[in-house]
Structures are given as C-alpha cells and as structure tokens.
Image: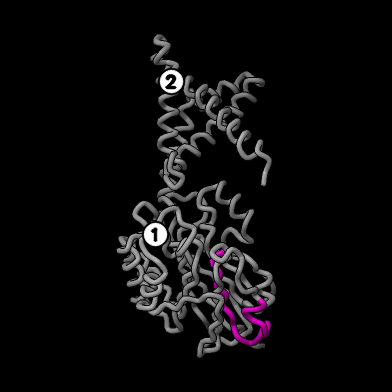
Amino acid sequence: MYHPFFQFVLPRLGQAALDILLYLNFLQLPPLQLAAQWPVLYYGLPLVLMALLAYISRDPLGLGIVFVGHLVTFYCIGTGIGLVLRRIGGTPLTVWHIFWLGGITPWLLTAGIMWWGRRRALRLCTTRYRLTTRKKLPGGQLRIVQISDIHPRSCAAMDHTRIPELREKIEACHPDLLVLTGDIFDEFTEPEELEAFCALFGALRAPLGKYYVLGNHDLFHHWREPSFGRAELERGFAAAGVRILEDTSVMLPCGVRIVGRKDYLYTNGSRFTAAQLMPGGPDDHYTVWLDHEPRDFKAAAAAGADLILSGHTHGGQVWPAGAVGMVAKNERNYGKKVINNHCTAIVSGGTGTWGYKFRTQGRTEIVCVEITTEKEM
C-alpha cells in the first residue's frame, strides 16, 4: 500500500496543476481575444470549455478521454517548449509563435491524431510470420491462423458488420489450424454479436481443428454485467466446433500438440505451471502453446513449447500509455520474440480494439503463421 500522500494528495495536486495550465492557455486562444473587453466572458469562457472537456472525458472507456488526454499532452509539451524559447528569444521564439497559433495548434494536432487513429484501428491487416522447425509436421508444413482480442461492440473496431471481411481474410490464409487466444468476447458483447461470431467460427474450415483459450475479459474483469455467461459461451463454441482448452494438452492425430493455458488474470495466477502441463519436457512433437497474456515464455520454452501465441496487449493500442502499461506487466508488447533455439513467441495486436475505434500503436490484425520442416542435409 502506498503512502496516502502518493495515493490521494499528489494526484490531486497534479490535476490542479494541469487545470491551471489549461486555463492559462485557453485565455490565449485567438477567438477568446474577441471577448477581452468583457471580463466576465473573457475569464468565464475558459471555465466553460474546461467543464465541457471534463464532461466528455468522464467515461474511462470512452473516446472522449483519449481526445482530452492527447490535447492536454500537446498543451504540456507546447508550454514547456514555449518557456524554453522565451529564454532564448529572437527568431526561434518568433517561429514558435507562428507555429503555436495562440494555442490552436494542440487542437489541430489532436484532431489529426483522432482521424489517423480511427483509420488505423479500422484497417484489418493480415500479418504473416514464417518459421522453421526440425520436428515433423503433417506434409512438412503447418499453417496456423490466430484470432485474438476481438472485443465486439459497435463503438469498437470489430463487430458483426465486419464479419464478411474478417472471414475473407481468414479463408485467404487457408489455415490448417485456427486458434482463438482470448478476449474474443467481453462484457459489452450483445447476444447477437455472440451468435454472429460463433456462427463465423462454425463456418470456417480448419482441418486440424479450432481451439480457444479464455482471456481476462471473456468471463470476468467486467465493467458491467455481461449479457452472457459461461454456459452460453460453451454452447456457442460447441456448436461452432471450437474446443475450449483450460490447462489442457491435446495431441492431434498428425502428431502436433496443442497446449491451452488458463488465463493468468482470470485465475489470479492459480493455474498449472508450464512444467505441470508438460511433465515430460521437450520431445519430438511440435507444440503450439496458447496463453492469452504473454507471460512465462522461458518456462513454456523449457517445458517444450515450440510456438507460443498470445494476445491481451493490443500492441499497446494507445501510445504511449498502452506501451508503458503493457511493457511493465508482460514479457512482450507486440510481434515476434525468439525465446531459445527451438521456441518462438508471437503476440498479436488484436483482431479488434478495446473500448473504441482508435489505435496509434500495434495493428488490428489476424496472424498467419507458416511453419515448415527443415530439410535434412
């Protein structure tokens, strides 16, 4: 437990300092100068603007808080630069005043970021990785498609209206194996979304099977009461031919092993260790290791994992806040990481976004991993 000063006093002091900084900057806005002859308007309108920003940022899951966060950040950076240049003076200060536009520039930059972030969130990519192994694979190769962190809702990047696009991209990869690495649904998923995506997974062909591990939002970690429970989730996946793996290892007839872990946050860390899941250690079977949160990479590799597939981080989603938070808690924020000479971990940026249609880090993606057996010399 932190000292009360750091928990309660310091955050309020920081908020007060930001409020003063914004107020002083708003006083310099060119439109407000027109009201300078009326003191009540001149000094009162910035308070109205601050109240409006506080209102639109009241929802911690809303896009308003992202807008205000970027605006405040640009004002803080600009104020710092302005203070330095006032000490220097001359041409640099003159150029800065032209660029700063009396404080309008942070609004323009924020608007640009919001436009770009929305486009980036809605652009669904296919990210391909090519790996090799010395272990035997069916026909000498294995193609895996990973879907992760869809979080379907109308205000996020993925909902049922985008299923045709998602299906087309998945089928274009011709997967042998389809894996769903958690947070496929969350507490904001409506029944029609649950039904539509389960129908999608049922329609997809994957000769070696379809497997799913729980994320931290599928059945818990809720901001509100969800519209479905475990029973509905299990029925939907059973009808779709998707097998749920919870601290379970499955050996496919072709000799490939699938290991699915319980989510670390969902179990509060009370799950089987990697060694308990594979007590025999590494062997000749190619092992695909599914774990929603990117943790315990070295332990999984030591137990015998050849490919670890995770999600959870959304690649940070909103830079830099997401990057800082995820790096602090997870072993990989996004992309590929070689764990040892036989094991590689891949962290998806998510097939959707969390909370809103906005992304400035990572990619909205499906992951296609192609593994081939190395030819003996």
10 Å neighbourhood of mark 1: few (<14), some, or many (≥20)? some
Q: In this view, does 159 lie above or below 70?
A: below
204 relative position to 217: left or right: left
Residue at the top extreme, as displayed: 37
Q: Is mark 1 on a helix, strand or loop?
A: loop
Hey, what amino acid is under mark 2? Pro
**CA–CA distance in space, label 1 to label 2:** 47 Å
Q: Residue at x 44, y 23 (%)?
A: 47
Q: How is the image coloured?
A: one colour
> Is 292 included in the stretch rendered in magenta?
yes
Q: Residue at x 43, y 65 (%)?
A: 184
- Range of the magenta residues? 275-293
Report x, y in % for residue 349.
Answer: 51, 60
Report x, y in % for residue 225.
Answer: 40, 57
373 relative position to 210: left or right: right
Mark 1, residue position = 226
Q: What element carries label 2?
A: helix
Q: Which residue is drawn at 61% across and 80% down?
A: 133
Report x, y in % for residue 35.
Answer: 39, 14
- In which quadrant of the rendered view does residue 55 lie? top left
Decide if residue 210 is in sight here. yes
Q: How many marks?
A: 2
> Is 287 included in the stretch rendered in magenta?
yes
- Tell me the number on the disc at residue 30: 2
